[in-house]
Amino acid sequence: MHRTGLLMLLLLPATALSHPHAWIDLHVDVDIDDSQNVHTLTQTWVFDPVYTMLLLEEYERALPGADQTRQLEALRDRMMESMADYDHMTEVRLDQQPLEIAGAEETRIKIKDDEALKLRFTLKLDEPAPLTEGSLSYRIFDPTYYIEMLHPGEEAVRLKGTAEDCRVQIIEPRPNAAHLAQAAAVDLGGSADGLGRHFAQWVEIDCSRSGEDD
């Protein structure tokens, strides 16, 4: 079975698709302890206003008469459940080796400035990732590229804890002609499975210079 756009697994009708069809701004807090181990990535997703409106309208129809708080909680629960089998759309590596993700916790959802949906959750690694053994890199993407998910700038990645000598680099995607053609062909019935990874940013956190200037 091909993967579908994970957030399309909510209640949105799969009509008039273009790729990407929606946009999410990403903000990530990386928790680094005193031994330079990474334990969690706390992600904040800010949905574009149009997609926010569509999601809220669907949940108003699904839960008529419910207040917005209940509708948002139902939306949050459905999102987190749908994404759990896909590591919450996140791939993490240490020194280019993939890391296991234990799960998500501390999930919250709200409407930002009365127009943008804001989802926040903490993604816990299965084991601490020691930055002393190599750089940590991650990317966040919808496999089908139904949703484009990008950090608006390096300031959207915050290193929390002992990270004075660490640096953040965002590596922009460079899809080739075949990937661009695949994205264009999706609307004509082509497969989108795995497409999103070619349009995803890599974020690299490197602490290898720590202590070199002492």
Image (tube, helix red, strand yellow):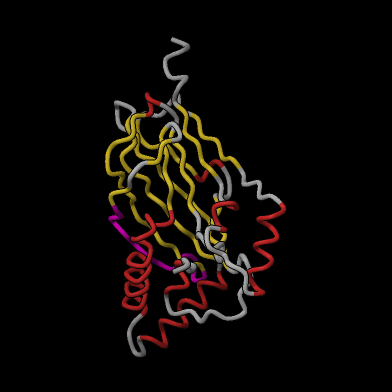
Stretch in magenta: 103-115
Q: Residue at x 47, y 19 (%)?
A: 209
Q: Position of residue 29 (x, y in %)?
A: 41, 44
Tell me if residue 119 comes above or below residue 28 in the rendering.
below
Magenta span: chief secondary structure = strand
Residue 90 in the figure: left or right of residue 67 = right
**Circle count:** 0
Q: Residue at x 29, y 53 (%)?
A: 103
Q: Nearer the viewer, residue 183 or 149?
A: 183
Tell me if residue 97 comes above or below residue 185 in the rendering.
above
Q: Quadrant of residue 172?
A: top right
Residue 140 lies within the magenta run: no
Q: Nearer the viewer, residue 60 or 134?
A: 134
Q: Position of residue 42 (x, y in %)?
A: 37, 49
Q: Quadrant of the C terminus?
A: top left
Q: Position of residue 82 (x, y in %)?
A: 37, 67
Q: Residue at x 41, y 34 (%)?
A: 94
Farthest top residue in view: 214
Tell me if residue 36 comes above or below residue 20 in the rendering.
above
Q: Quadrant of residue 6?
A: bottom left
